[in-house]
Image: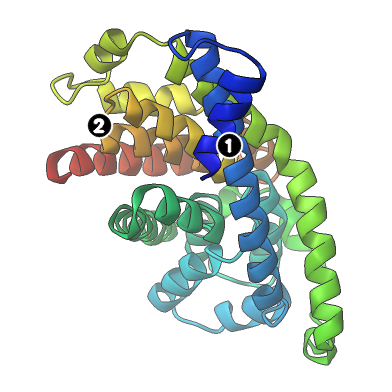
Amino acid sequence: MWQKAVDWLVYGLFGFDRTSLLGGAIDFFIYDMVKILVMLTVIIYAIAIVRSFVPPEKVRAVLSKKNEYVGNVLAALFGIITPFCSCSAVPLFIGFVEAGVPLGVTFSFLVASPMINEIAIGLLWTLFGWKIALIYVASGLIIAIAAGILIGRLGLEKWVEDFVYQIKVGASTGEAMRLTWKNRFDDARGYTVDLVKKIAPYIALGVGIGAFIHGYAPEEFISRVAAKTNPFAVPVAVLIGIPLYSNAAGTIPIVTALIGKGVPMGTALAFMMSVTALSLPELIILRKVLKKPLLATFFAVVGVAIIFTGYLFNLVI
């Protein structure tokens, strides 16, 4: 029904030719932009209410008392319900380190938070089906847990900037339990409005790029460069994704357009992972709290894991 309404708007009211590239791109942009914003708003609101029962201070207290492997798993799972921009995860990362959470455990959170958050799960499920969403979540968790364990085993605590250990954070958890349902609904509404306003430009950018790819990018060229037969397709997709900055919601429209042009699922999802988990702005922010050897190790470990996952997806999907 929504597709018919958009078609009427673009080809009927606006008068674009159904065979024109521009008309197709505009149709794609309007359809995806509204659809994703609506889904995003509903998902964010629901998750904000759930999140009101789980304050970050309580999570820090729990993780700091767990052994390494259990902590890695719990931190990665907690990453699913945290803010879904790689840069916004850094303050919580600092809080974890200061609270005495093992370094490897904090990195499991830092990898999982932007890559497999609840918004990405909801959108992937809606757009590609539950199997793709489940595979993406499972691979993201494995990457986050394995990367955290490996970094923890390397003993790189000395490469964290000294000031991080001197930061003092609050530890009050009672406030979340005293909230009424009206407080939770009001807070969720305000959080949803603020967050949608912040990420809407990135969604628009992502949908715009996706619309351009959908309407103008030569299908033959994309299919040849990103084909399964090209052994360098996955690493190239990951390298292209690193300089970009977006959240999962803004990246999924690009992934949708790439898959529509014949790009293999593994290559497209590797691109999405690199944009959300290895963005250049995240690198710049992390440089403020991590010294170069630890930062390089983090990017290398996660980058290799994403590339491996992309190849694996292309083999099995």
Instruction: Give the mark toward the camera: 1 or 2.
Output: 1
Residue 102 picture location, percent across and down:
53, 68
Element at badge 2? loop
Q: Is residue 279 visible?
A: no
Lateral position of residue 36 relative to residue 182, left or right: left
Residue 35 sits above or below residue 104 on the image: above
Q: In this rendering, would 277 be left or right of 59?
A: left
How would you rate the neighbour count of disc 1 (Cα within 10 Å): few for under 14, some for 14-19, many for 20 or more? few
Structural distance between the alpha carbons of marks 1 and 2? 30 Å
Residue of label 2: 264
Q: Earlier in the sequence, mark 1 or mark 2?
A: 1
Three-letter residue code for mark 2: Pro
Disc 1 to disc 2: CB gap under 8 Å: no
**Residue at x 40% of width, y 37% of height:** 300
Which residue corresponds to the image point at 71% horizontal and 42% vertical from the top-left?
Answer: 199
What residue type is disc 1 on? Ala
Left or right placement of residue 51 versus residue 78 in this view: right
Looking at the picture, how far across and down is residue 280, in whole percent? 59, 30
Q: Provide residue 54's location: percent of width, then percent of height.
A: 67, 80
Name the residue at 49% across, 51% down.
123
Residue 253 visible in image: yes
Quadrant of the rendered image containing residue 286: top right
Q: Is residue 279 above or below residue 214?
A: below
Which image quarter holds the C terminus?
top left
Residue that extends furthest to the front in the rendered view of this protein: 12
Q: Of 104 and 230, which appears nearest the observer?
A: 230
Name the residue that disc number 1 marks. Answer: 5
Q: Residue at x 19, y 43 (%)?
A: 312
Where is residue 126 shown, x and y percent of the image? 44, 54
Secondary structure, mark 1, is: helix
